[in-house]
Image: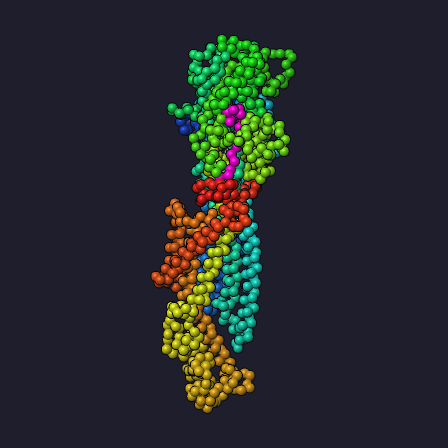
Amino acid sequence: MGCGRRKKQAEAPLFDDGPTCPYSIKPSELFAMNENKDMEKLNALGGVTGLAKAIASHEHTGLDADAKAGSPASVAEHSRVFGANKYKEVPSKNFFALCWENLQDPIILLLIAAALVSTVLGSALPEQRKEGEWIEGVAIWVAVLIVIAVGAGNDYQKDLQFRKLNAVKDIIEIKVVRGGQVKIIPNTDVVVGDVMIIDTGDKIIADGVMIDGHSLVVDEASLTGESDPIKKSPEEDPWCRSGTQVSEGSGRLLVVAVGQQSEWGKTMALVGEAGSEDTPLQEKLADMAAAIGKVGFGVAVASFIALIIKWFVTWCRSPEGCSALKYHLNQGGLVEFFLYAVTIVVVAVPEGLPLAVTIALAYSMKKMMRDNNFVRVLAACETMGGATAICSDKTGTLTENRMTVTEGWFSGKKLDHAPDKEELTPELLRELTLNVCLNSKAYLIETGDLINFVGNRTECALLMLARKWGADYTAVREEHEPQVQEVYGFTSARKMASVLVRQGQRLRLYNKGAAEWVLQKCVSMYDAGGAVVPMTDAAREELLEVVVGMASRGLRCICLTHRDYPLTDPKRPADFFEDPVRVDDRLTAMAIVGIKDPVRREVPDAVVTCQKAGITVRMVTGDNIHTARHIARECGLLTDDGIALEGPAFRAMPEEELVPLLPKLQVLARSSPEDKLTLVALLKKQGEVVAVTGDGTNDAPALKESDVGLAMGIAGTEVAKEAADIVIMDDNFSSIVKSVLWGRSVFNRDEPLITPKMWKHILVQGFYQLFWLFFFMYGLPTLRWERYKITSECELISAGPRFAPQPGYCLAQMSAPKPDGGFGLDAASAQSYCTLLTQCGLPCGAAGASPACAAALAAAGGPALAPGAPFPSGGEKGALCGPGVDRCEAYSIYRKVEMFWEGKHEKQQEADFKRADSLLFNSFIWAQIFNEINARRINDEVNMFADLWRSPIFLGVLAVTIGLQVVIMQTRMGMFFKVIPLNGTEWGISIAIGAGAVLVSVATRLIAKIPCRGCGGCGGCGGCGGARRPRRRRGGGGGDGGGTELAKPRGGAANGEAAV
């Protein structure tokens, strides 16, 4: 048959179908039988028993966990031959592919076009090359490369982060039987031949054949699209598919296909990987960036058109005419105008905002994972920051979920301790042991001296009691497993669970559940002597008082009962045992146990933190109301004026009566999933942002309805986890509080960008920087600070640049060849024009016809004048052409000379201003550095430097920024930024101006704290310390707090804000 399938020559085979396969059935045959649901082939092999033998497994004990690697019975060999339970990942894009994607950005393409034009013109045209105009193009190319590299790097890091998180998301703990022992392993370790245990709410992670089970119903909608669940049975339809959910019942499967050979694996290979959705805040920022970008683009186009018109008009009206345009294409021309327009667009479009939020969310997700918060939906990072109500389960969330039987009522005797077996009659001990061991789906896994609980913790506590009595629950189950007829799992509606066992010629139902519910169904009880006697109303009331007493001490009360049915009864309907409500009736009470589940030590402080932050914490539990009240008071949830309701009373009240009670409703006991869903819907109608915890399959609707669904990672079913936004990995309420803290931190960091809260700082800082911009551009050159004075035109013509005077500068420039940047006149003509320019008032010197001026004017082709005679009227044209003459060659040459020196002077002004410009540039950079420090405190705190040392990444960013700025300013790198080195005094001035941004920010914050008259504490003016109430939105959320300490959003000065 070959060596297995290959998609590519380089890929290893997915399974071993060749001669090295040690099993009597080849992988391809097994997979084909599974794919076609071939019952004929399965029966030919001898059913599940024969199939298990064919693949070196066993339908009861599973694979040999101790077999050496390489032997047919080993797990490793099954993984090698049949494949691993892993799906082929969509390969991540490499760095260069991400660079190519970033290259498609329209802004980047505009910059590339500008760089190309600037570089070509600056290099190809001699006059441009001589002025070093190619540097502009090279600088743009470097900037483009940096932007592309940084963008690709960010995309790569983001993809890497999410891949790591998704890898964690896909890990599920699975119960399998290996070597006869139940083991908990990750789903990726499941192999063909494993015996997998499934229960209500579980996700099936591999294709399997049903070995046995009880009322197993599977929802296959994810594969088939059919909404009706399918009932499974070993005889008719034993085939269970990966990717489906267990709706009801329980069972054991023999795994026959994993990974890419399973039905779900094949589907995933076709579908691939879906892209992630943006969060609401990302959408808002993207919309804002698009709106600003449109305005910026319009301004850029208008500016470009205006500059082009001015450029044409200016040069076409010059003496040289439009031919002068070719000398001004780069600097002061088309390329420069285009760069101006691109700069406006680049500066206007805040494209970094959505990216910054994405990076922040990914970083927060990683940090939240360390705090046992696995974020399944990215938007939940934001939404938890706006939570105003948390509806929490009790067991395992507020309590430790390490339950222990501490007291109880046993056969007519009230005990203040868990009884030893000697304190019970042999018959009662046997019946209680059978009830505890058979009517349970929990397991105890011993690892050295440590016993780990797997499954329902109440059932685990009862198993520990049976262990104390010397019973081996696994042996009891194995002995009686063939006699088990039906298993009725616990539901929140029934509040009980049962198992029907055949005992000779009778059927005995073992039942356990919430004591006050079960007692209502009891008609008899064991007395102190061990005899079964009728349960009178007085006896029932006495037992209910026992229950209330234990519940008031915070104990969970479980009643254990039984009832007998005849093996056959002609009067009994054929479907009688299919309805557990009908079966669980007329019971005999054997014992009521009180189970202690201590409150987690950290929960009371966490509850207080939430309450100070304005978050109302409500307990929603299925426990007795007395137990719920006691635990709620221990946690600090239930106040003196708080309300505790039971589920039946809650659901019986109309909405108009419930709404007024909601603010004080703190405990909802004996609640059903429908009650939780109703409570969530009512709270959301009142504008609350609701977070809900859930662990059961029936909790999924409430988890979906809430703004943030929180599933329990340990006790939660896979259905609950799939419906949730965040999975609390340790089932701990304090971890939920940490998720709120991170949510507020994320939202506080990003929400102000789209609200007035941060814009007041942005505007003030903008005005501060504009002040220095105008000062450096117009004020500094006028001061008596020699270093920053600008060379005047006459200074330049007469003696050269102010900071590098050159005798004979005018003559040298006028006589130098044009290719070398000169005007190209002969020496005599050059001397004549230099005399006119420097001595004769054209434009420098005294206007008048000195002998030198008269001679120069005559040499230039102007009218002859007597020495001492004044120049003719009419300005330069009159002086050079004579009175009444419109145009002459002397004036045409003079205009060209004049424009030549205007260009020289313009360039010299730029060179002179470069000193002030460098100081301005350095000051602006330092202002941004200090503004980064300002941005660390976004709730108007005055001390921006608090805990600065606790942010090593931030300090590293500052250090890199400062280091690069020093390199730019003090090395030849400055030529690309058109700056020159600064001296020590200038560095001090720059840093001082930058530090002034902190003082401005402090002043702004202090002013914001001044109360406004007529504000009334509304927070509308920012002076009352008020904050917006977060908006309710599924997946969006709101809130203005965050950081390391939560504060009050209602009734307190901080009003929803928190220190970051």
* Residue 781 seen in this snapshot: yes
Q: How many marks?
A: 0
In the visual, does 925 lie left or right of 645? left
Indicate the colouring scheme: rainbow
892 relative to 252, above or below: below
Q: Does the magenta stretch include residue 689?
A: no
Q: Residue furthest left?
A: 984
Which residue appears at 45% of the width and 87% of the height? 849
Residue 117, percent from left and from top: 50, 63
Camera-nearest residue between 869 and 857: 869
Camera-nearest residue between 742 and 537: 537
Magenta part of the chain: 613-629
Q: Does the magenta stretch include residue 619?
A: yes
Residue 76, percent from left and from top: 43, 30
Q: Residue furthest bottom?
A: 866
Which residue appears at 41% of the width and 79% of the height? 811
Residue 489, percent from left and from top: 55, 23
Camera-nearest residue between 375 and 319: 375
Which residue appears at 44% of the width and 85% of the height? 853
In the visual, does 951 lie left or right of 388? left
Which residue appears at 46% of the width and 61% of the height? 771
Residue 318, percent from left and from top: 53, 75
* Residue 53 seen in this snapshot: no
